[in-house]
Amino acid sequence: MIELTKKEQETVLLVYKSFTSYYNANSLAKEIGLSQVGTMKLLKKLDREDILVSKKIGKSYIYKINIGEEIVRKLIAFILINESRKYLKWKEEFKSLNKSGRIILFYGSASRNYAQARDIDLMVILNKSDVKEVRDKILEIQKMLPKKMHSIEATKNDLIENLKNKNKAMIDIIKTAIVLYGYDDYMGVINGFTNF
């Protein structure tokens, strides 16, 4: 049975979402707020549990998600869902946009500190035929919100092409976004980019 601490879950999610990065203990320590020694212990544990895979480069090891393991895919799905539960207000706010095959990502300053944010950022991955419907619903939602809302609508193919082309803005959104809806579809896209 796999049991992960909060910090271990945070690490797994960070390594998963940051699929363009190669983390070693030193670089990851800065991101998760642990010492290099503490981070090394954490990484070795996740490697032993087959959650991460490592590759030696020079004198250090770099780590990636072991996406080939079914249990790891299920674990990541759980962590993504668990992360979204901290944003129930926003899940409810954008519920009308949810539909099978769509991915709803909440990102930007409002996802980190709503009180300090000037606007609300949302990305909706959808079928091309749904663009008008989604834009109309976003206009309705905007009427109820006290802050300006910025949304990006894109197809799954647009997302995949932007990630293949290493579009920095898109990668930053993926790295920091909260998946409100469409976990399986989100993972279907991201899993293709997680290997060494």
Image: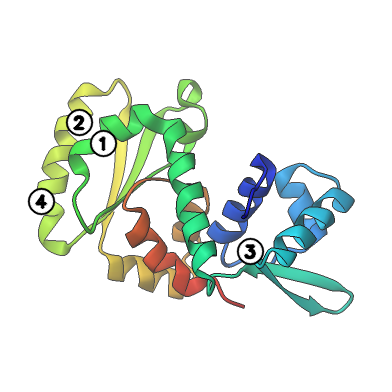
Residue 68, position in %: x, y? 53, 75
Residue found at x 18% / y 62%:
127
Horizontal arrangement in the rendering, residue 185 relative to residue 30 (left or right): left
Judged by depth in the image, the label closer to the viewer, 4 or 1, is 1
Identify residue type, mark 3. Answer: Ile
Q: How far apart in space, not on screen, are marks 2 and 4 (Cα)?
A: 14 Å
Quadrant placement of the N terminus: bottom right
Residue found at x 14% / y 31%:
140
Q: Which residue is mark 1?
A: 94
Identify residue type, mark 2. Answer: Ile
Q: Residues within 10 Å of mark 2 (few under 14, many from 20)?
A: some
**Disc number placed over residue 141 in the picture, else none:** 2
Disc 2 and disc 1 in contact, CB within 8 angstroms: yes
Q: Residues within 10 Å of mark 4 (few under 14, many from 20)?
A: few
Mark 3 residue element:
loop
Q: How far apart in space, not on screen, are marks 2 and 1 (Cα)?
A: 8 Å
Mark 1 residue element:
loop
Marks 3 and 2, the one that precedes in the sequence: 3
Residue 75, position in %: x, y? 52, 55
Q: Which residue is mark 3?
A: 51
Image quadrant assignment for residue 187:
bottom left
Mark 2 residue element:
helix
**Disc number placed over residue 127 in the picture, else none:** none
Marks 2 and 4, the one that precedes in the sequence: 4
